[in-house]
Amino acid sequence: MRDYLVSIITPMYNGVKYISETIDSVLQQTYPHWEMIIVDDCSPDNGAGIKKVKEYKDDRIKLIESKTNSGSSGARNIALKVAKGRYIAFLDADDIWHPVFLEKQLAFMQTKRAAIVFSSYKRIDENTKEDILKPFIVPEQVDYKSLLKSCPIFPSTVIYDVEAYGRFFFNEKMGSLRDDYVYWLNMLKKTDYAYGNKEILVDYRLRRNSVTANKMNVIIPQWKVLRKVECLSWLKSCYYLTCWAVISYFKYRS
């Protein structure tokens, strides 16, 4: 793999608690050719998160202070518009990359001759960083139809090739709920498969008391994606929503 630049997109909202660990995980990458674009989404924290980011003096870390709150989709789009990399990677402001994440994912992308790859990840307690659930091991590949049934793609595990795809932007009408899911659906309409690396390369902070609640709260938005965004029939939407509900139940019980 040649030394192409990777643009890392990080939206931040009230992120002071974890952003240092997230940035540190990027600084520890064995692949050094990256820029990290952090967009503070008008956080109501009196600038605490912004101040924390400014403590880092590495020129590869770039901070954008948004004056309006537009959700994770809007914050990501702000970063995407200025990203200079051949590759786009996503890293949420409370997640942690393993040191070999970029190196492994870029090599995996080359091996698979893929335009988009994602990886397996650990699910850890937000404070103690102990495992809450077993690591989530991703399937070898997904396409558009399988993604309608279930989404194994977690944003902080993804890298995609801008030259192969073009630059994709998030649907800001989705706000911060299901915006990433719609993003992957749109991308997979342009290619056959996204490829999953079964190696665990990311730590995902997961709140213990919200594992079930989050899924309950997202049922209606999931239905709206199927019916209003993807324009599927009522019958197909019922089928895919049922698949999603069943698969999600077992995903968070293992």
Image: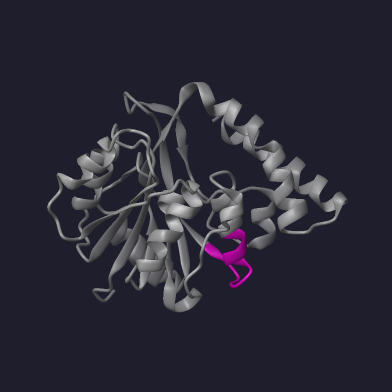
182 relative to 117 in the view: left or right: right
The x and y percentages for residue 227 are 78, 52
Q: Going 14% across and 44% down the picture, which residue do you hit?
A: 55
Whether 69 is among the magenta residues is no
The x and y percentages for residue 254 are 54, 30
Q: Nearer the viewer, residue 29 or 44?
A: 44
Asked whether residue 106 appears in the rendered view, the answer is: yes
Look at the picture and state if 154 lies above or below 247.
Answer: below
Look at the picture and state if 176 lies above or below 113.
Answer: above
Q: Residue furthest top?
A: 209
Give the image quarter of residue 87. bottom left
Q: Going 62% across and 60% down the picture, which residue do you hit?
A: 185
201 relative to 254 in the view: left or right: left
Q: Nearer the viewer, residue 91 or 103?
A: 91
What range of the chain is rendered magenta?
A: 184-194
Q: Nearer the viewer, residue 238 or 62?
A: 62
Give the image quarter of residue 189. bottom right
- Asked which colour scheme the image uses, the reply is one colour
The x and y percentages for residue 208 are 47, 23
Give the image quarter of residue 30. bottom left
Whether 186 is among the magenta residues is yes
208 relative to 23 in the view: left or right: right
Q: Going 40% across and 70% down the picture, which residue do you hit?
A: 111
Asked whether residue 119 appears in the rendered view, the answer is: no
Q: Residue furthest left?
A: 57
Quadrant where the N terminus sits is: bottom left
